[in-house]
Every structure is written in C-alpha cells, then in structure tokens.
Image (cartoon, helix red, strand yellow):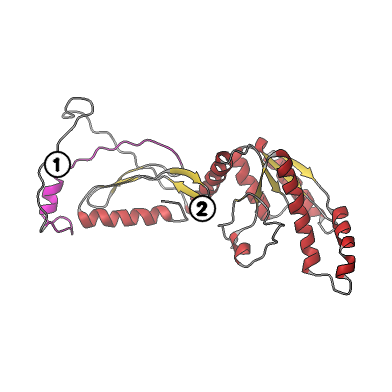
Amino acid sequence: SPFHAGKRDERENMLRARAKDHGLFVAYVNQVGGQDELVFDGSSVILDPNGQTICRAPQFEEDIVLCDIDVKNLRQLRRDGSSTFQLEGITDVGSAQHFFVSGKSMRGMKKIPSEISSPVSPIEEIRRALVMGTHDYVSKSGFRKVLIALSGGIDSSLVAALAVEALGAENVIGVSMPSQYSSEGSQTDAQQLADNLGIVMETLPISDVYKSMRNTLEKQFSGTDPGIAEENLQSRIRGNLIMAMSNKFGWLVLATGNKSEMAVGYATIYGDMAGGFSVIKDVPKV
C-alpha cells in the first residue's frame, strides 16, 4: 500500500487486529520504491495469532527477511478459545499436505532467528519517502540530470538538498535568476547553498527581459497601477528560462512549491509551478 506519514503504524495496527480476531498468523508483503506520484515504503511484516510482530523488513529498503512460524498447535489454540475468533460452523477440510523444498524433513534443524527492523522516526520516514520518490521518478522517466530554480529561500533549498541525496551532486544543476528587486542576501544565500551541496549553479539575470516585457505591455497597462500582474511577470520569465534549458539539454525541472502554498493558490501558473516533478507538493510548510 502507498506511503503517507504515519502509514506504518496504521497498517500494523490494522493487521494486529485481524491476527487477534481470527487467531492466525498474518503475513503482509509490501513493495518498495516510487511509482509515478506514489511511494511504497516496504516494511513487510509477519504477526502471530496474538498480534505480536515477529518479523519486520526495513522501511524504504529492498531486503529479504526469513521467519520460521510454528502452526502445529494453532488450530488447537483456536479451539481452546484463546482468541476471539469463533470456529462454530466451520467444517474441517482435512490436514494440510507438507512439502519440503530441500527434499528432507526440517525436524531437528535450528530455527531461523527472526529479524524485526526498528521503525524510523516520523521526520526520517518523510525524508526517506521524498528521496526515494524523487530518485525513482527521475530514473524511471529516463532523465539523467535535474534543474532547480534557487531563490535562496527554504523551499528551493530543501528540494535541492533532497535532490542531491537522491541523485548525486553531479546530477543537480541550480539556476539563479535575480531581478532588480532581488536582495543581495538572497543571491549570496543561493550561491552558498550551491557551494555547500557541491552543485553547479548557473546565473541568468532577468532584469533586461523584465524591462522588455514591461515595455511591450506599456500601452495595454497604461492608466493602471502596478500590481500582481507585474509581479507575476518575474515568476513567468523564470519559468520560461528554466524550461528552455530543460528543453535544450533534456534535464528535468523540479518544481519547489509546497502543499500549504498550493492549497491556498499562492503560486503562479506558468511561473513557479513550472516543472516536471514537484518534490514537496504534498508537504505542508507549517
């Protein structure tokens, strides 16, 4: 089942209830990896008839785990009323037939110790989900490198850090696109981030393009006060430039919008919404 924050606990609580209700071993197998916009976190698990976890695979990692279970006394325990499951009306269909993969009985062999992987913290599982989702989307879509518009702010910085972890610094290109309204601090922050992450950063000033577009629209905008339309020109210029680089070199643009801003419409269509994959679109900022 696909991952969301807290899903592992929800899943195991449901399986624990089913195991106890029916007095059975429950083995749940989950896939691992990203597929389109979904992430599957693994964490396959086996629970005993008392609802106790006796084997658990790690989250966000492909693994093979082995677990021995003893079902010899299971039916008798259920008849003795050790579980809430009632057997009235159930017909005995006979004994199960035993097959030995090795060709010989397993009697006398040592029991395999079960592995119970420790759960990761709530914040750590979200980080791993974002990294895995980004890596698998980019690789399965056939891209080698990604582009990220770096503003010096929190969102683009977080996306860049996740992308470097997912893809490697050599496959992440930052793009700074300052205008005449950009503060010196935001530009130096973006460069410092790129240096810290070890990624290449291209700088494309947009002041001339912005002035050209304002001049082109001067007649149509005459008699009106500057407002959101003029502000959004900057965002759309940046969107056009970074998509042009994507188109030219075949690199995927990672959008940097978060769930809180998307939920209230605090985004610019054809501007900061431009991109092929939005890493933190399901992550609230608050």
- Residue range corresponding to the magenta coloring: 61-87
Say which residue label 1 marks: 72
Question: Could you say where residue 230 lies in the image, as x and y percent from the top left?
Answer: 81, 65
Say which residue label 2 marks: 123
Give the farthest residue toward the top.
103
Q: Which residue is located at x 88 percent, y 74 percent? A: 223
- What kind of residue is marked 1? Lys
Marks 1 and 2, Cα distance to the nearest angstrom? 41 Å
Q: Which residue is located at x 55 percent, y 57 percent? A: 282
SS type, badge 2: helix
97 up-or-down from 228: above or below: above
Q: Is residue 239 left or right of residue 89?
A: right
Q: Quadrant of the C terminus?
A: bottom right
Question: Could you say where residue 12 lies in the image, as x and y percent from the top left?
Answer: 34, 53
Question: Could you say where residue 177 lies in the image, as x and y percent from the top left?
Answer: 79, 50
Question: Could you say where residue 203 lies in the image, as x and y percent from the top left?
Answer: 80, 45
Observer-nearest of 175 and 215: 215
SS type, badge 1: loop
Instruction: Say which of marks 1 and 2 sits in front.
Output: 1
**Residue 64 drawn in magenta:** yes
Q: Is residue 3 left or right of residue 157?
A: left
**Residue 244 drawn in magenta:** no
